[in-house]
Image (spheres, rainbow, N blue to C red):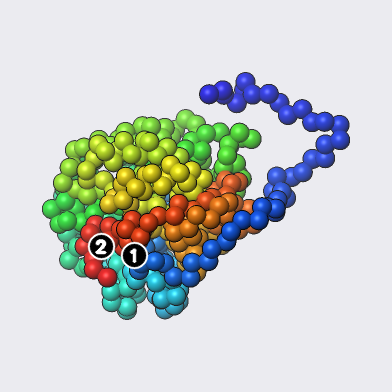
Amino acid sequence: MCDASSRSPIEAPPTWKPLDLSAFAPESMLEAKRTVIEKPRYPVIDMHAHMSFSAHVVNGVHLGPERQYLGTADEMIPVMDRKDVRVINNLTAGYEAGLDDALAKFDDKYPGRFCAFTEPIYAGFLESDYPERQARAIEDAKRKGAKGLKLLKTLGLFLRERITEGELVKIDDPRFDPMWETCAALNMPVGIHVSDPIAFFRPTDRFNERYEELNNHPDWSFHGPGFPSNEELLAARDRVFARHPRTQFIALHVGNFAENLDHVAASLDRFPNMTVDIAARISELGRQPRASRRFFEKYQDRILFGTDAFPHSPDYPQQLFCDELYDIYYRFLETDDENFDYAPAPIPPQGRWKISGIHLPDSILKKVYHENSERVLGLKI
Ligand SMILES: [Zn+2]
């Protein structure tokens, strides 16, 4: 691979008229088949959504139980009914009083239609008995109704020795061992987000395939000193998977390496306690439809449907909770349509390309849409 400095400069012909990249919005002239999937072939569990977040975030670390809400159950249910989404999992339901509140607003209000994951209490990280307290907090969350534990990329990229300052804490830090083991003992799956798209670890320059996204969100870049590499993060994650074989890990976002399905496949082969979801990664999967189809065939029992939906999030069109979000996922999974947008946005938000469907057979669709999540989450729809 050549590095940026060795690549040739642009030599513009004399007739060349500069065009601002942000103004470039080419309309495809391709006449391609467009299949509209009103309802999915089988009912759906969306195992990856966010209806609430911590109300207090410092240097990327969520602190305190209070929640802020992105949407309401009342406004979500009609979309879920239209798109046959039977259950939505709120991965960031928090803990203690925040979890109580999130459960009351969703799970209790529409029984059977929502479920929730708890989260680590990083605010308590400096307490001398943090490992045991954290383990007890997981037990408490389970008693309240949490189905699993979710880790944002905070661990590995933001949590530091003095919580918001100091050295970064590694994903395989032994202070979290009782937390992983308690999840195993209580049969609570762990949804874990480690690292981020590989382009976020590269310079934000004209060679970066996600230049516009990084230019719009400079804080999403993990390039440069002070950040571990993608390889280091995934290696630390793998050490956790190996050390806690009884704990079920859902490696979110296609194991956070959808750009390299061979790598994800190798991890799945190595760790029987690992599954993946597809949330916010159909952009990656759909630009390699034949490799993706083979991946789904081989790992059909270990792939969970998820969208990473946020209600009311116009800044993230690929994750905006609405009918069209589900339409696109269903089209990707069910059809052989080619060259379509992976997000309802004039400019593709996760890189300038389009996707093609992978046309899964019914037997695999059923597993991906709900059977795998039923098994992993301990649900029945
Ligand atoms: Zn998410």
Given the image, on which type of amino acid does mark 1 rest? Ile
Tally of numbered tags = 2
Residue shown at 44% from the left, 59% from the top: 334
Circles 2 and 1: CB atoms closer than 8 Å: yes
Q: Which residue is mark 1?
A: 45
Q: Residue at x 50, y 54 (%)?
A: 336
Residue 259 seen in the figure: yes
Q: Residue 374 — which label?
A: 2
Identify the residue at the far top of this view: 6
The answer to which of 7 and 292 lies nearer the viewer is 292
- Crowding near the residue tagged with mark 2, few <14, some 14–19, many ≥20 C-alpha atoms within 10 Å: some
Within 10 angstroms of label 1, few (less than 14), some, or many (20 or more) residues?
A: many
Q: Is residue 251 above or below residue 329?
A: above
Q: Pick whichever, 109 or 376, lies toward us.
A: 376
The residue lying at 57 percent from left, 61 percent from top is 34
Q: Secondary structure at mark 1?
A: strand
Q: Is residue 203 left or right of residue 361?
A: right
What label does residue 82 carry, if any?
A: none
| Position of residue 48 measured from the top left corner of the image (x, y, whole percent) | 37, 59
Viewed as shown, does residue 60 lie left or right of 142? right
Q: Nearer the viewer, residue 280 or 65?
A: 280
Q: Farthest residue to the left: give it.
A: 185
* Residue type at numbered disc 2: Glu
Place of residue 94 in the rendered image (x, y in percent of width and height, measured from the top left):
31, 61
Percent position of residue 232, x then y:
36, 32
Kindly tell me whether residue 122 is visible in this rendering.
no
| Residue that sits furthest to the right in the current view | 15
